Image (cartoon, rainbow, N blue to C red):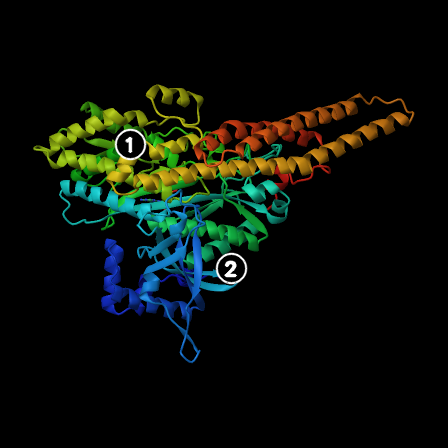
Amino acid sequence: MSNTNLHETFGCHVFNDTVMRERLPKATYLDLKHSIDEGSPLASGTAEIVANAMKDWALENGATHYTHWFQPLNGFTAEKHDSFLILSKEGRALTEFSGKALVKGESDASSFPSGGLRATFEARGYTAWDCTSPAFLKEDSSGLTLCIPTAFCSYNGEALDKKTPLLRSVEAVSKQAVRVLRLFGDTETNRVQVSCGAEQEYFLVDKDMFKKRADLMFTGRTLLGAKPPKTQEMDDHYFGTLKERVSAYMTELDSALWKVGVPSKTKHNEAAPAQHELAPIFEMVNVACDHNQITMELMRKIADHHNMVCLLHEKPFAGLNGSGKHDNWSLSTSGGVNLLNPGKTPRENAQFLVFLCAVISAIDTHAALIRASAANAGNDYRLGAQEAPPAIISIFLGDELTDILEQLETGEEHETMQGGVLDTGVPSLPNLSLDTTDRNRTSPFAFTGNKFEFRMVPSSASIAGPNTVLNTIVADALSNIADRLEGAADFDKELNELLAELIKKHKRIIFNGNGYGEEWVAEAKRRGLPNINNSAESYAAFISPESVAVFEKHHVYSETELRSRYEIKLEKYSKIVGIEARTLLMMLNSQIVPACTKFAGQTAQSIAQIKASGVMCDTQAIEEVLRKTTSGISSLVKGMKKLERAVEKFEKFGDDFESQARFARDSIVSVMNEVRKYADELEVIVGKEYWPIPTYSDLIYSV
Ligand code: ADP
Ligand code: MG
């Protein structure tokens, strides 16, 4: 039984505004607050005082160490712990945490992937405090550690992490959004924030079962396994009553998240058995990104306390729903006004339409890039698999809003559909009806009333990448709009023309129908929308001339930084496929083939025994089982030989990561799928007592 007091627990391990206000001299507090709000650098004197207060607070809570906490390009978080200990001349223990140590760290970063950004002779990486994300105390059974969220760069300032580009992209979109706001008479707002709420899906399986499956241990997903007779067809798991073991896990998880200030809000069972979801309250995107990393880390850690394992893979089980991360995204002013919320006044509504059209044009112009931002090897098994959005990027707006845009495009006012009226106040724009209650779960990018929900994002990945892309391309669309309207002689006329043009040009990206249907694939092709169904191919969008131009223009990534990401992503893809292929071969060689052989041998013996009994019996059916088993084994072994040969070739590619990824995609993934089919067919023939690993039924009903 939990006795968490939400008021006391929430944020008790965060050096948050309340703690700062309490512990810092007023002038220091105001300086820090200014840096946080404006994103400006902290003066060294201020840093010194803040560091000292932070140290006292951490020590009082029982911490002995601090670490700069950062997000290198391997997709995880990294930390290197230093104690607060210093020695007096007499050798007595004293504690120290300087402003310099708070603001900047230095670490030998040679083992992190850098995609060639950092030559080995310059292996150092530098971490710099992102004071917009608060420091927190990380707790485990060994105690507490003060964690300082930081950005991670090379000596010459190239970003070696996921956070730096994210922060740069927030600056970019803020700058351009403010330009647009000025056009609508807003003279106050000087920053626009990106809000983000990342819903996280995950699976829980029993740890004892997990340990018996090398595939789950090495790759996070099952590489073989026949579909059980019942999975999710009865829809009985979705939003179902939480099992006590799961509920105890979620309670501990919530409590741990609340302590470090992660605003975990909703928890429920998802569609597939053993699948669950956690949704937080939305926050500023860089904080949401940090918090999502913490959430994933705690999800894994706390599962262990309950003898379970949390699977964050996009597709742990073939044939069952996979896991994603719904990235809810919106823009709001420093004053807290959501710019994707249709407003109350005509001016606000016209402004809303500008932001809406900016997003539409951004997504259409950079569809391949936004697709690539949500790509990873695991997502290849999820996207388009009848339970997740397809690999085609489109936007759902709902019928009403689409109708409104049509009127804007044609300039013809007609009877609008039911719903509230959206008064634009621009004489040439029709007054518009609006009802945003309708939802479409099959769209990869849906407008849901006052935010967009990007549903393609992979469950295991950091949300930094997709948001960096989204912020940048929207910044670019806003910048183009501002360029045009700032010089307009007649603002209303120019606005009207511009919106009509944008809609005409980009409306092909709007699709309100069933995204899971076959017809959509054909229709999207007719519309000229890209359909890139595997991650290896999608990554090229990062280095296309258009992408490089937009990232460089808004100072989010340099071309060198982009090329490094491209290389890392392709290498990672290849590595994952390589590990999967080797794991599959190992399991087949050492477990599955011997088990099937044993079963065949015993069946043969049984047939011989029955025949020898002298009783006249019909053994044909049993002989058929034997035949099926042995022919299954030979198909399987043939497939394994093919896979072995492919893996041998794959390992000889050396530094040519592009060709290696292509080979992995074309010549390994398909053979793995083929081999798996033979093994899965054998699984249903071979007796359960012979099958050497837990089955899908064992795993998905294990908790
Ligand atoms: P669902 O998608 O399950 O219907 P909701 O629409 O209630 O759920 O919200 C899903 C997520 O979107 C939550 O994490 C929520 O905090 C977040 N969210 C709500 N409003 C915004 C917003 N303006 N900007 C970004 N995220 C938001
Ligand atoms: Mg959602």
- Whole-percent x, y for residue 63 in the image: 44, 67
Placement of 302 over or under 559, stated as above or below: below
Residue carrying label 1: 546
- Whole-percent x, y for residue 595 in the image: 72, 35
What residue lies at 43% left-to-right and 56% top-to-bottom? 79
Residue 425 seen in the current view: no
Residue carrying label 2: 2
Placement of 375 over or under 128, stated as above or below: above
Residue reaching furthest to the right? 614
Tell me the quarter of the picture where residue 52 sits. bottom left
- Number of callouts in the render? 2
> SS for tag 2?
loop
- Whole-percent x, y for residue 19 in the image: 33, 65
Placement of 125 over or under 146, stated as above or below: above
- Quadrant (top left, top right, bottom left, bottom right) of the N terminus: bottom right
Horizontally, residue 24 falls left or right of residue 63, namely left
Give the residue type at disc 2.
Answer: Ser
Query: Camera-side residue: 335 or 131?
Result: 131
